[in-house]
Image: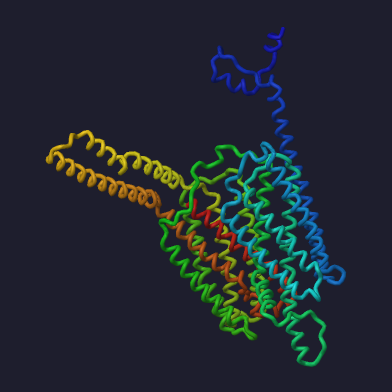
Amino acid sequence: MSDNKVSKQKPCHRCKRRSASTPPDTATIHYEQFWLYRHCSSVQQRDRQAQKAGQLFSGLLAMNVVFLGSAFISSMIFNHVAITLGDVWILLSILKVLCLCWIIYYLLGTSRQPHAVLHRDPHAGPIWIRGSVLLFGAFSILLNVFQIGYSAILIHCKSRVDIVFPSIEILFICTQAFFLWHHAKDCIQVQHNLTRCGLMLIIATNLLLWLLAVTNDTIHMEIESQLREVELRFSGNKTTSCMCPNTTICKVFQKGYILLYPFNTEYCLVCCSVLYVMWKNVGRRISHHHLSHIKPKFKFQGVVFGPLLGTIAVIIGICVFMMYQIQATGSAPNRQVFVMYYSYYIVLLPLMSVGAVIGTIIHALEKKELDTVKNPTRSLDAILLMGAALGQIGMSYYSIVAIVATDPRDLLNSLILSHSVLLIFQNITQNVFIIDGLHRQPSAAATEAEHIGHTGQHAVASEVPTEQETTISSKQEHTQMSPGKEEERKEEQNHEAYDQRRVSMLELGQEIRKASLSYIHSYSHLTWKRRVLREISFFLVLCNFILWVMPTFGAHPVFENGLEKSFYGYSTWFAIVNFGLPLGVFYRMHSVGGLLEVYITA
């Protein structure tokens, strides 16, 4: 009866596909009879639904936290009497304590469970971005130390929250940096919902810290108020403001805080990007064929003109930056300083744009296959590049409108107009070049050359005898020979000298073969297209580096030239610059990482 029941069952779709290719005598397996096959699709579907539900719930949690914090910060800006900066600090301190509790739980509990981390994403958390987390985190800690010292000196007119908040911030930065350094590549397989909610809570907290850093400018306001207090004191009026004593340490804390202030915003944005990739990797399973066995490494070979031109651009940029800082920080900034600053940009930006266009054309001519493997890190890099570029592009369009509406024929105004147009074009062309390069597969010739180079070196090392082996063999031959005659001794001495000459020649040949192998594998496989791509990538890396340094350490002509400020008003242009300038600084730093990836895979 059981045989009849089995024979009456309809064949599954797998059996129908195999019936044409398999002979009739072979036994076919009816997969539809198995419970696992019948329920496998439903289990996978429920797993996807649970993943989407967890991402939706954690995203809603982060959205509500961000909206709540944004309401506090905006209320502090528009009605600083009802909601003070101390109230915002208390809210952020509560969020930081919750984040610290979850990070400690993840480090001591979740990550140590069996089968918790079965996979690690090789593309997530590269060394340059984790190094930037440590670098910006160290500067942010130093920033908070300066803030604590500044508040401790003025403790008679400041609240204790001014000291408690930076202390919690230091603990939060240290814990978060340790967490991201060791667990940025984790694809956690347990406690999915709790992990997603914890990561989104940290992302929301970092976004609120970035928003507060962008909108809060209390130290600058205090310095300006202190200057007004000095003027009032000389005029004979009484003042009751909180004054920094005329001591060296107080001035050091003030200047150090102002100098290190941009690093805090960069730290928050970098941490958000790493945490987002971790959030996307929760529950992700990486198959073995997605992992590249031979990873391309950074090698400074085959590039000459890119580093040379980039070094020249960096040196000139440092000189322009130092001259700008010396003259623009005076009471009345000289007009020639702005002409020099914008002239440097007008010369450098077209070169960068032309290099990016040539690189994009070479990418189109190379006929490389696109890397279509799902990669959250690469998708996030493209989104961040396009999103961060909006800061500089937005400020450029505001400047264009202000200049065209006032006097575009003036020398300085025409330079600012040219700078704005070239900056928009440079951002677009560089984004296209980087994103196109990130979606290309690594060159097969480079990986094969590296693999052949390693195997060739091992083969040479195994074929050529070492000095120790030759001396041992010569000694064994000498012991076998019967001593006693002078002729035999002379023959032995001649034989030893011959062996030494033979060993030296073999060593020389081995070194020559190693050097020739390394030269062949580094240059022969490097075609002209790959050489040009590496030259362009390295040149753009150095150019973006100097364009990151100049605004990060205080060169802000968009606010100091006075044109847009007088056209839009102080408060409006201050908000535009505070929103666009940190995004522009982040864009330059993130472009350096993307260009290094393009250089390595070229």
Going 68% across and 74% down the picture, which residue do you hit? Answer: 253
Is residue 394 visible in the rendered image? The answer is no
| Identity of the residue furthest to the top in this view | 1
| Identity of the residue furthest to the front in this view | 484
Q: Is residue 65 left or right of residue 438?
A: right
Q: Nearer the viewer, residue 508 or 72?
A: 508
Q: Is residue 150 left or right of residue 475?
A: right
Going 74% across and 35% down the picture, which residue do you hit? Answer: 46
Quarter in which the N terminus is drawn:
top right
Q: Is residue 318 left or right of residue 65?
A: left
Q: Position of residue 64 (x, y in %)?
A: 80, 54
| Identity of the residue furthest to the right in this view | 82
Which of the 4 quarters of the picture holds residue 157?
Answer: bottom right
Which of the 4 quarters of the picture holds residue 110?
Answer: top right
Q: Position of residue 94 (x, y in %)?
A: 80, 57
Q: Position of residue 92 (x, y in %)?
A: 78, 60
